[in-house]
Image (spheres, helix red, strand yellow):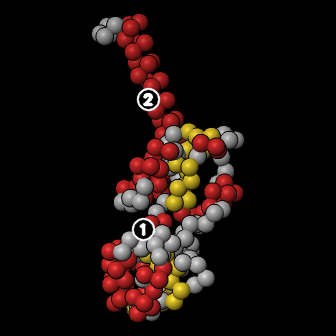
């Protein structure tokens, strides 16, 4: 199986790496990137070469790049709660539209370098990295803590992306608070022991 890859030489002199990247089977495009398809067995060698030389490496397909309009895409496909607010998918904090940071549930850094993860996303119906299904609202704090992590963050994001989860959670909290307040009021008025 051949995998489409790209190597970005932007911060470095491209001629320094030209011959080695050509030996991997990559061709230079108009900018400072080398692109091509390589056999799966050469993928780890190319990753290691890029890591040693501080070059940016990524799998070159529809999953590999972050679009400029992903924030607008999110707001077009997700309606606000109570007319103008969004819940953070990770902690449930209520945010105004201008305070929302739109996060890629499956991180760009991981998806762009992992063909197995890309296959998993295809099975879940996520056809591209910037799909509405891969975007969630987040507060600054959660977005920074999550970074490129996955694991528990993915589970939290998948559950928390639904506003009704947070509305139900707040309703339960209020119901518990009211029940405790009523019990305390009853104890205050009537004492501990009845009869």
* Residue 68 x %, y %: 63, 63
Q: Residue at label 2?
A: 176
> Which dot marks residue 154?
none
Q: For the point 37% across and 11% down, which residue is it?
A: 187
> Which dot marks residue 110?
1
**Quadrant into which the C terminus falls:** top left
Q: In this view, does 104 lie above or below 170?
A: below
Distance from disc 2 to disc 1, alpha carbons, whole Å, reads 41 Å
Q: For the point 34% across and 80% down, which residue is it?
A: 49
Residue 132 falls left or right of residue 26? right
Work out whether residue 16 or residue 111 is closer to the camera in this orientation and state it: 16
Number of marks: 2
* Residue 83 x %, y %: 70, 41
Q: Can residue 98 be seen in this view?
A: yes
Q: For the point 32% across and 78% down, which residue is it?
A: 48
Q: Earlier in the sequence, mark 2 or mark 1?
A: 1
Q: In this view, does 47 lie above or below 176?
A: below
* Residue 20 x %, y %: 39, 88
Work out whether residue 93 or residue 130 is closer to the camera in this orientation and state it: 130
Work out whether residue 31 or residue 35 is closer to the camera in this orientation and state it: 31
């Amino acid at each position: 199986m051949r995998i489409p890859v790209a190597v970005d030489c932007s911060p470095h002199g491209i001629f320094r790496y030209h011959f080695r990247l050509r030996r991997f089977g990559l061709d230079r495009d108009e900018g400072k990137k080398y692109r091509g398809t390589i056999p799966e067995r050469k993928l780890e060698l190319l990753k290691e070469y890029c890591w040693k030389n501080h070059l940016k490496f990524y799998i070159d397909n529809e999953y590999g790049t972050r679009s400029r309009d992903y924030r607008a895409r999110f707001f077009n496909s997700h309606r606000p709660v109570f007319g103008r607010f969004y819940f953070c998918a990770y902690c449930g904090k209520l945010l105004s539209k201008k305070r929302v940071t739109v996060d890629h549930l499956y991180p760009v850094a991981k998806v762009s370098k992992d063909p197995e993860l890309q296959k998993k996303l295809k099975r879940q119906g996520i056809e591209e990295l910037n799909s509405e299904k891969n975007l969630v609202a987040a507060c600054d704090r959660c977005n920074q803590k999550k970074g490129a992590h996955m694991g528990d963050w993915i589970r939290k994001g998948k559950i928390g992306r639904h506003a009704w989860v947070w509305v139900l959670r707040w309703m339960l909290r209020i119901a518990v608070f009211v029940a405790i307040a009523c019990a305390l009021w009853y104890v205050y008025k009537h004492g501990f022991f009845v009869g």
